[in-house]
Amino acid sequence: MPDTAYIFLAGASRGVGREVAHCLVKQSLKVKALVRSNTVKAELEALGITAVLGNALNPTEVEQAMLAEPISAVISTIGGVRADEQRVDFLGNKHLIDAAVKAKAEKFVLVSSIGSGDSAGALSSQVLEALRPALLAKEQAETYLAGSGLIYTIVRPGGLKSEPASGNAVLTPDSTIAGSINRADVATLVCQCLLSRKANNRVLSAVDRQMVYVQKDFEILDLS
């Protein structure tokens, strides 16, 4: 990644996105984050991150934030339902992808979820039904990114936990695998994908080897 360009991060207010922010800072990468509140903006700026106010559901704000300075790559961990009941999982990511194309970003890393797309069979029917609206929106975002022309990596974490990183997390192209994973470990994998060509144009499930729901042999992607 060029030293003079920023990694553009959306979703850094909490969860996996905040863990990704810490991971990128530890690697001394220049980070620009799109945030929705002044409180989060101040928290991220205290970490040395350039933070700009904007809403991923507003394409003009996304473009203005992303095109102001050179961007080498984009990471999105956004998701959920806003107050107006709009799902950000697809529409917000669509705006980020469109802006990344205009910014000529080298890569886009999208954090999605196991259960999206061809990994639906990895979850029980009850879980799939409960998460259906979110998973359908995430699948739309995955499909849109894959067709955008950008180099991409789609990371599908399993059930998210808040414990410290275990170091046992892995990425697999096997869409039948499901399990849990700590948010800090997801962030580490995302940062590795950002810098590894082996992750380019791949859709990968992320699980902790010690927390796989059904123990069986599966392929593990080596990003080194």
Image: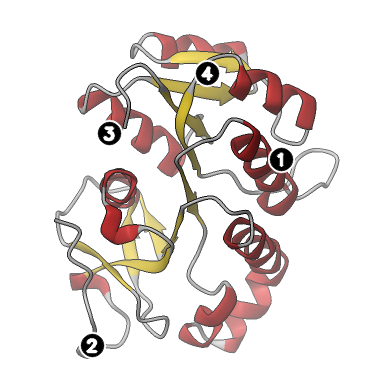
Residue 120 location, quadrant: bottom right
Do tag 4 and tag 2 residues touch (Cβ < 8 Å)?
no
Q: CA distance from mark 4 to mark 1?
A: 21 Å
Q: Are marks 1 and 3 in contact (CB under 8 Å)?
A: no
| Amino acid at dot 4 | Val
| Quadrant the N terminus occupies | top left
| Location of mark 3 (residue) | 23
Residue on which the image places disc 1: 95
Which mark sits nearer the N-terminus, 3 or 4?
Answer: 3
Tell me the SS state at disc 3: helix
Amino acid on which the number 1 mark rests in the picture = His
Choose between 122 and 99: the one closer to the eye.
99
Q: Which residue is mark 2?
A: 215
Circle 1 residues within 10 Å: few <14, some 14–19, many ≥20: many
Residue pointed to by mark 4:
40
Q: Is residue 67 above or below residue 18?
A: above
Q: Indicate left or right for 186 with 166 as reference.
A: right
As shown in the figure, which amino acid type bears the numbered disc 3?
Cys
Mark 1, secondary structure of its residue: helix
Q: Earlier in the sequence, mark 3 or mark 2?
A: 3
What's the image's color scheme? Answer: secondary structure
Compare marks 4 and 2 and give the one earlier in the sequence.
Answer: 4
Residue 89 horizontal/vertical position (percent): 66, 52
Say the numbered circle drawn on residue 157: none
Relative height, residue 27 to residue 192 (above, below): above
Name which of mark 4 and mark 1 comes first in the sequence: 4
